[in-house]
Image (cartoon, rainbow, N blue to C red):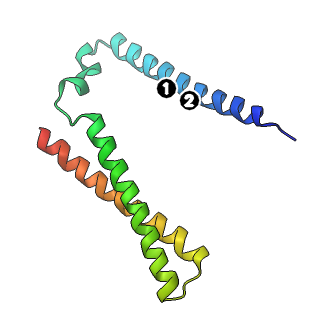
Amino acid sequence: MVGPGFVFISLFIVIFGIVYLYFSTRNKERLALIEKGADASIFVRGRTQKAAPIWKILILNLALLLMGIGLGIIVAGILSEVLYVKNEIAFPGCIFLLAGAALFIGFKLTKNLDREMD
């Protein structure tokens, strides 16, 4: 059997690999653009434009996700008690459905928030 240490080591290796590939690919793309004579301002364009602070977006999406999960549990409880839907079907279905709806609403609100900042 594989011990719990193997899982943590594997997880660390996967995270390291993803981060390494991200930064090495980004570096290669930037070097290629510089060799072609592209302006260096394209690398910082996202930082100069006004955008909503990331903490506002994270808090908004996290709050909506948790409210969606809570609402999903309430709706699943009602479905299982009133309509006699099996708990194994009602709870995961309602939780995932309403959590997804909450994230979609968060996406739309974030898009509107970014539009207001422009």
Relative to 113, 17 lies left or right: right
Q: Nearer the viewer, residue 65 or 107?
A: 65
Q: Amino acid at mark 1?
A: Tyr
Q: How many marks?
A: 2
Residue 66 place in picture, x, y as percent: 40, 55
Q: Amino acid at mark 2?
A: Ile
The residue tagged 1 is 22
Q: Which corner quadrant holds the N terminus? A: top right
Based on the displayed image, in which of its 4 quarters is residue 35 positioned? top left
Crowding around mark 1 (Cα neighbors within 10 Å: few <14, some 14 to 19, many 20+) is few
Tell me what residue is drawn at x 29 percent, y 58 percent: 105
Can residue 103 be seen here? The reply is no
| Residue pictured at 44% horizontal, 16% vertical | 27
Is residue 19 shown left or right of residue 11? left
- Between 34 and 112, the one nearer to me in the picture: 112
State the image coordinates of residue 38 (x, y, percent, origin top left): 27, 15
Name the quarter where the C terminus is drawn: top left
Camera-side residue of 93 and 80: 80
Where residue 18 is drawn, which disc sits there? 2
Give the Cα separation between the discs numbered 1 and 2. Answer: 6 Å
- The residue lying at 13 percent from left, 39 percent from top is 117
Please report contact status of discs 1 and 2: CB closer than 8 Å, yes or no: yes
